[in-house]
Amino acid sequence: MDDHPLYSCNRCRSPIALRHNLLSKDFKARSGQAYLFSEVMNVVLGEKREQQLITGRFVVADVYCSNCKEVLGWKYLKSFNDSQRYKLGRFIIEKAKVLKEYS
């Protein structure tokens, strides 16, 4: 073991994200605390939709585990607020939906 944290789907343990892609632990989602990642893996995106979130209006797509189809969070696709554009192309993953493991 080389102690590199890996975030896996809480339901099926499929790898979802690497620690070095974690940008912030200070986000909120449906179930509470959430992580902001620059990249994720083993996921599929749902349909685009416009959504009003705490920080403004966005176009987002739900992010599903590609193995078990559990909804893990969402991807930011468009922001209607210039100050929130840094989130575009990034992923919110709910803390309650993933396990932190060490590979």
Image (tube, rainbow, N blue to C red):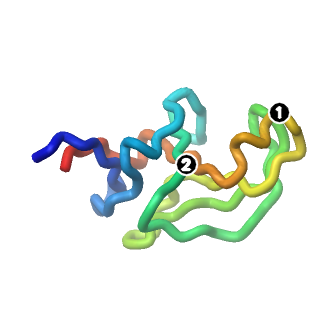
Name which quarter of the figure residue 48 lies in. Answer: bottom right
Residue 83 circle label: 1
SS for callout 2: loop
Q: Label 2, on which residue?
A: 38
The x, y position of residue 41, in whole percent, is 44, 63
* Distance CA(mark 1)–CA(mark 2): 18 Å
Q: Nearer the viewer, residue 4 or 73?
A: 4
The x, y position of residue 92, in whole percent, is 57, 46
Of the numbered discs 1 and 2, the one sitting upstream in the chain is 2
Task: State the residue at coordinates (35%, 48%).
Answer: 7
From this view, report whether residue 32 is shown above or below residue 94: above
Q: Tell whether 35 sits left or right of 19.
A: right
From this view, report whether residue 19 is shown above or below residue 13: above
Task: State the residue at coordinates (19%, 50%).
Answer: 103
From this view, report whether residue 71 is shown above or below residue 101: below
For label 1, count other residues whose C-alpha is less than 10 Å away and answer few (under 14), some (14-19) or many (20+).
Answer: few
- Amino acid at dot 1: Ser
Name which quarter of the figure residue 5 lies in. Answer: top left
Which residue extends farthest top? 26
The x, y position of residue 2, in whole percent, is 15, 44
